[in-house]
Amino acid sequence: MTVDPNTLLAIVAMAIATIATRIGGLVLIRFVTIGEAQRRALEAIPPAVLMAVIAPTALVTGPAETIAAVVTALVAMRLPLLAAVAAGVVTVAILRMALGA
Amino acid sequence: MSDTGFIPNFRAGATAMAPLIVAVMPIGLVFGAVAAGKGLSGAEVTLMSALVFAGGSQFVAMDIWTHPASWAALAFSALLVNARHVLMSASLGAKLQGFSGPAKYASMLLLADEIWAMAEMRAKEGKLTPAWFAGVAVPFYFVWVTTSLAGALLGAFLGDPKVTGLDFAFPAVFIVLVLGFWKGRETGAVLAASAAAAVLTHQFLPGVWYIAAGAVAGVAVALFASRSQEVRA
């Protein structure tokens, strides 16, 4: 359970960089007035960011991931979050095994 | 007290977050195991999860980890991977009306993707309170830190997450969450632009530029759509 000084420095540097991004937006909106265009831009951020995070996995990683993504979305329309996630995980595990990926 | 007190509100937040707390457990274990494999001690793994608390950037850090650790490269990569937090905190920051100044900043320190997405959903219903946010964020934070440590200690016993499919848990969570932001055709355009830009960038640029590219493309389409609506009106 030792802590290497170089590792500690790296962790602290990563933490400072991350905190800067987390506080950054809050500071930003203090200096920008929120008009109609800004409001629309802010509204589009959540779906745009979430989609950007999942798109490479869901669309171009392989058939197992793409099919599991579709299954997750379909299950989510009827069942709660955890059930949809479980369906996605099970689907991807089975398909990877079946497809040898 | 009715459902306006701190404890009931905190509990409601924690209950809403329960599925994501379950989903983050395997990810924390996997992170700890990967980090231990890179030669980090249990204490170092715990420190990183507690201080950085941003899964994506922590996994990327393990990808580029060297001995001795290069703090500049790691900080720059964390900045890049977490650049989306600027957009997220700008978006959510505008919805923290019931929060005091210090509470706003404290909340933003715990702005992980999953916490942010849940808070955005709650804010859409107009019911986001500091106690509810704490209920979402604090248990999730502790589970992330403790499962990271457990993963570092258990290490090799865990097996390959690709075989169990557990690496797909978080993309799956995000797929479900993104459905919740559907508001009609305009959202479709935002999603299509974001997906196209992210996939293209992912194919041609190394690292995590794809998240920034997708986010910017989606926001640009939303702005363009609103301008063309104004022209028609």
Image: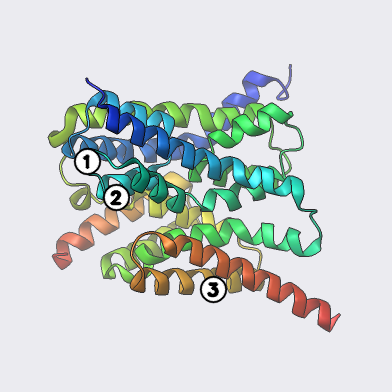
Disc 3 to disc 1: CB gap under 8 Å: no
Is residue B130 found left or right of B197 in the rendered image? Answer: right
Quote the CA–CA distance across marks 2 and 3.
25 Å
- Near mark 3 (Cα within 10 A), the count class, few <14, some 14-19 or many ≥20, is many
Q: Is residue B76 left or right of residue A31?
A: left
Left or right of A37? Residue B183 is: left
Let me know if residue B229 appears in the view: yes
The residue drawn where x is 82% and y is 82% is B231
Give the residue pinned by disc 1. Answer: B34
Q: Residue furthest right?
A: B233
- What is the chain identity of the residue bearing mark 1? B
Q: Quadrant of the N terminus of chain B?
A: top right
Classify B205 as above or below A53: below
Question: Mark 3 and mark 1: span between their CA atoms?
Answer: 34 Å
Tell me which label, 3 or 1, sits earlier in the chain.
Answer: 1
Give how far across and how far down residue A27 sits, in percent. Answer: 68, 43
- Please determine whether, in this image, residue B152 is positioned above or below residue B180: above
Q: Quadrant of residue B50?
A: top left
For the residue marked with disc 2, what is the amino acid? Asp
- Parent chain of label 3: B
Q: Secondary structure at mark 2?
A: helix
On-image quarter of the C terminus of chain B: bottom right
Which sits earlier in the primary sequence, circle 2 or circle 3?
A: 2
Q: Which residue is mark 2?
A: B167
| Residue behind mark 3 | B193
Q: Give, as a three-letter code, the residue at label 1.
A: Val
Callout 1: few (<14), some (14-19), or many (20+) C-alpha neighbours within 10 Å? many
